[in-house]
Amino acid sequence: MSTYLEDAANLLRKMVSVPSFSCEESLCAAIVSAYLKSKEVTVERVQNNIIARLNCASVDAPVLMLNSHIDTVKPTEGYTFDPFNPPLDNDKVLGLGSNDAGASVVSMIQAFLWFKQQGKLDFNLLLLISAQEENSGADGISLALKEAGRIDAAIVGEPTQMKAAIAERGLLVIDGSAKGVSGHAARGEGVNSIYLALDDILEIKEHKFNKISPLMGEVKMTVTQIAAGSQHNVVPELCSFVIDIRPTDVYDNTEILNELKQIVKSDLKARNLSNRSSATPVGHPLMKTLELCSVESYVSPTTSDWMRLSVPAIKMGPGDSSRSHRADEYVTLDELCGGIKGYINFIEKLNLKI
């Protein structure tokens, strides 16, 4: 296992040495592709996405996909070192993307290589390293899945401390716009769009969605932005606001949008209706294997590429989500080792009968 860990750490250090922002992953994709080719793995590039296949069983056997992403957000302020040229640490890999989600990428690759060398399974493996996860881009996993072929189940790699998310809330962002009539503030003219928006925001604050998920609880909804006016003496004609909604598995996003339109007067437009919630089916082999491996499960409040999948999945990977999108990002070598071993152990125990 020491060789696998050493390879994982070295590959991860190379990955963080190049910027890999969403839509700019080409250099990092080349590094990962070259590494896989050096291990005699056939690589398929779909723009900046990478696909590799491992036939452990017959061609008609089920397929388990291992998926994580190589893109990152841009570095936040506050780094005490260069996020692309971090200091060498014997116990950690530092740098932008080391934790989210480079640790999952390299751990999944090492697990994939383990089974290439030593493992026999009753199903086949598909490794899909995707781009544009952070911005939900059209040329990320959605594009790669068109070339991936059969997939029956998936593990989505994100920093979860190797706990398993068996569900994750979706994301629905709605732009609201209240329209009034402009006028001179001193003469009491016009219809103040701010007051109209505040009436609607109060309705939103007090609104409760009737359906409650046994797994996720209530839909969470928060107004997070508001903007209006340009001069102190002009009654604003328009007031815009933004609603952040975290749906559950008992609602689809269109249903939520339509319900809100019934209670407000402002114009509401969803930025994206496809960021749905996800949940692992009760009784699925993935769930049974979590029990066999004594893996702690939870409901994730954040989204991932899981929402793009139409097959049963769990979200699990090394690292800690509290370090994501923050300065001085890192992952420990112990976490990498736990990720590699954890993936191997889970895959070995998985009975993927479809």
Image (cartoon, rainbow, N blue to C red):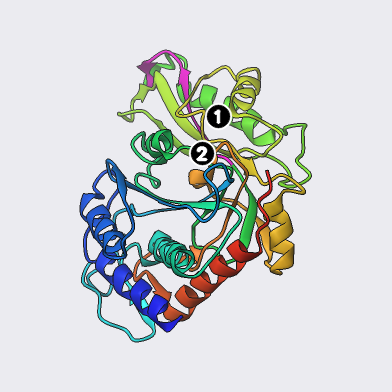
Is 330 one of the magenta-colored residues? no
Q: Work out whether residue 264 or residue 287 is closer to the camera in this orientation and state it.
A: 287
Q: Work out whether residue 252 or residue 343 is closer to the camera in this orientation and state it.
A: 343
Secondary structure of the residue carrying tag 1 is helix
The reply, left or right, for residue 192 in relation to residue 295 is left
The residue at 77%/38% (across/down) is: 212
Residue 161 rendering spot, x and y as whole percentages: 55, 68
Residue 103 rendering spot, x and y as whole percentages: 42, 66
Mark drawn on residue 110: none
Q: CA gap, disc 1 to disc 2? A: 50 Å
Residue 141 rendering spot, x and y as whole percentages: 41, 41
Examine the image and state in which quarter residue 279 appears: top right
Question: Which amino acid is tagged 1?
Answer: Leu
| Residue that badge 1 annotates | 198
The label nearer to you, 1 versus 2, is: 2
The residue at 33%/30% (across/down) is: 232
Residue 254 rendering spot, x and y as whole percentages: 59, 23
The residue at 38%/15% (across/down) is: 182
The residue at 32%/53% (across/down) is: 42
In the displayed image of the protein, which residue is found farthest to the front? 58
Query: Which of pointers 1 and 2 lies earlier in the amino acid sequence?
Result: 2
Q: Work out whether residue 39 or residue 94 is closer to the camera in this orientation and state it.
A: 39
Magenta region, residue range = 170-185
Q: How many numbered circles does the render carry?
A: 2
Question: Would you say residue 223 is visible in this rendering?
Answer: no
Bin the neighbour count of mark 1 within 10 Å (Cα to Cα): few under 14, some 14-19, many 20 and up: some
Note whether 214 is above or below 92 in the view shown. above
Note whether 231 is above or below 13 in the view shown. above
Secondary structure of the residue carrying tag 2 is loop
Is 172 one of the magenta-colored residues? yes
| Residue that badge 2 annotates | 150
